[in-house]
Image (spheres, rainbow, N blue to C red):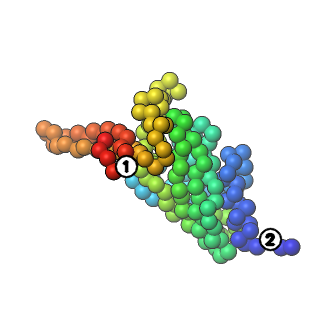
Amino acid sequence: MATTTRDDRMALFTKHQDPATQPEFWARVADNVDWTVKGTHPLAGRYRCKSEFMESTFARLGGVLPGGVKLQIKHLDGDRDTAIAELHSMSMTKEGAQFANDYCWASRFQDDVIVDVPAYLDSMMVAYTILRNESTSPEDAPSRTDTPDIDFLPRGCASLVIGITAQRRPRGLLHIESREFFQREGGDP
């Protein structure tokens, strides 16, 4: 039985579920790929070669996700020269939190090789994970003990709120301060 284009694309994107099989995916990405990571976070930008993209995104995320980047396919439309892949991260951060990010990659193929990808993701989740987990040494990594223990609450009763305050200071400097707190649903922090 012949493999369809969709079956091929499904098998290819499935390689992201395990860091050990990801090289098989990257072998089908052009060295001069045009990969644009959309958003406003530390990994956002346009990358015009595979090695630059991988070093600036997957390797950097790998530094804050000890088990590596693990992506599961939620949906794939891939029976033409462009495959639209909806992916969900199954990774854990250095802090032990889930990195439950969702992605959408519109991967354009040429001769069965990916040559162009606009990639969409949750900017806030990436920024927060990088800022909380990226450090020069493991000893400098933040500890989960610095956040309140809300395990006693039933699921859905609390949410993490990040408050950001910006103030204009003398000489035109902008001071930005953030704080995080847990809030009961429908209640005050």
In front: label 1 or label 2 = 1
User: In the rendered structure, which disc, 1 or 2, sits on the residue that comes first in sequence?
Assistant: 2
Give the residue drawn at x 86%, y 73%: 1
Which of the 4 image quadrants contains residue 82? Answer: bottom right
x and y percentages locating residue 110 in the rendered image: 65, 70
x and y percentages locating residue 78 in the rendered image: 65, 71
Say above or below: 174 vs 149.
below
Give the residue drawn at x 29%, y 44%: 188
Bin the neighbour count of mark 2 within 10 Å (Cα to Cα): few under 14, some 14-19, many 20 and up: few
Bin the neighbour count of mark 1 within 10 Å (Cα to Cα): few under 14, some 14-19, many 20 and up: few
**171 left or right of 186 in image:** left
x and y percentages locating residue 138 in the rendered image: 53, 27
Task: Residue at the far bottom: name it.
Answer: 80
User: What residue is pinned by disc 1?
Assistant: 185
Mark 1–mark 2 contact, CB under 8 Å? Answer: no
Q: Hey, what amino acid is under mark 1?
A: Glu
**131 left or right of 111 in image:** left
Total residue callouts: 2
Tag 1 secondary structure = loop
User: What residue is pinned by disc 2?
Assistant: 3
**51 left or right of 25 in image:** left
Q: Hey, what amino acid is under mark 2?
A: Thr
